[in-house]
Amino acid sequence: MVSLLVFACPQCRHFTNAPAGQRHRRCSYCGKIIDITKAMCAVFDTPNAASAAVREFNARGDNEFLAAVERSKDRVRALMPSTIIGIEDISSKGKAPVHVGKRKMLMEMLEKEARDKPCSLDHISELCREYKLEWFWVEDELLKLADSGLLVFPRPWTVQIVQSSEKKMEKAPEKTDVSREILATLREAGGTSSVKEILSQFEARGVNQTSVEDSLDKLMQSGAIFEPRPGVVSIV
């Protein structure tokens, strides 16, 4: 039988559990995706024992939990998986820069991995390196997709795309080619600007993000602009 880990959500401080070996799960209380490898954990041998512990810790607070963590230290070390180093571990911490075509890459990944059946959050985090995406950025995007109805969490540690093609067509925002306007904006900025700043300026003009990103991709492919560093574009 698989042991279960009990831990607290770092955002809302409610306790929850997951099977030993899982590295991520969605908090049932506030929706945050929890990195279990960074949480203090207590180990329980059965689902009933873990569920009872969650109820007790949520009712009585941290003291009982900390005592259980102390008793479980050696077992937790043996049960938890080795940490996988992703792109976010070798790039600067904090808010991720907005790369050109970044959201398109995420959607391609999800279409491939989570369209026909649920995909584990752990597998999504492992693929981030292959797709050159920062996991902490992907976490936020998954929650936004869930809020918009494009994605569900069938279990707290899996995701799946659920939107039908008809619904997708119905909700897709109207796209506008703003390539010329982007070039004008870059010239006004001296030839170089962050993608984040460009998105912000066009959002203020009522242009949706998809239109701006598609126009940036078009300019990149045509050779009119290039990306001197992640999250920054310049006129050639």
Image (cartoon, grey):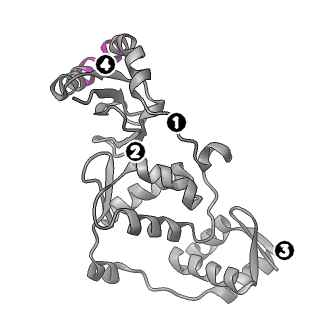
- Is residue 235 among the parts visible in the rendering? yes
- Residue denoted by label 4: 61
**Horizontal relation, residue 94 to residue 59: left or right:** right
- Residue denoted by label 1: 83
* Circles 1 and 4: CB atoms closer than 8 Å: no
Q: Quadrant of residue 116?
A: bottom left
SS for dot 2: strand
Residue numbers of the magenta segment: 57-65
Q: Residues within 10 Å of mark 4 (few under 14, many from 20)?
A: few
Q: Residue furthest left?
A: 48
Image coords of residue 46 (percent x, y): 19, 25
In the depicted structure, whether residue 177 falls above or below residue 57: below
SS for dot 3: loop
Residues at marks 1 and 3, CA–CA distance in whole angstroms: 43 Å
Looking at marks 1 and 4 on the same chain, the residue that comes earlier in the sequence is marked by 4
* Circles 4 and 2: CB atoms closer than 8 Å: no
Instruction: Identify the residue at horizontal 68%, vertical 63% (top origin).
Output: 231
In the depicted structure, whether residue 104 falls above or below residue 77: below
Q: Which mark is residue 33?
A: 2
- Residue denoted by label 3: 190
Residues at marks 1 and 2, CA–CA distance in whole angstroms: 17 Å
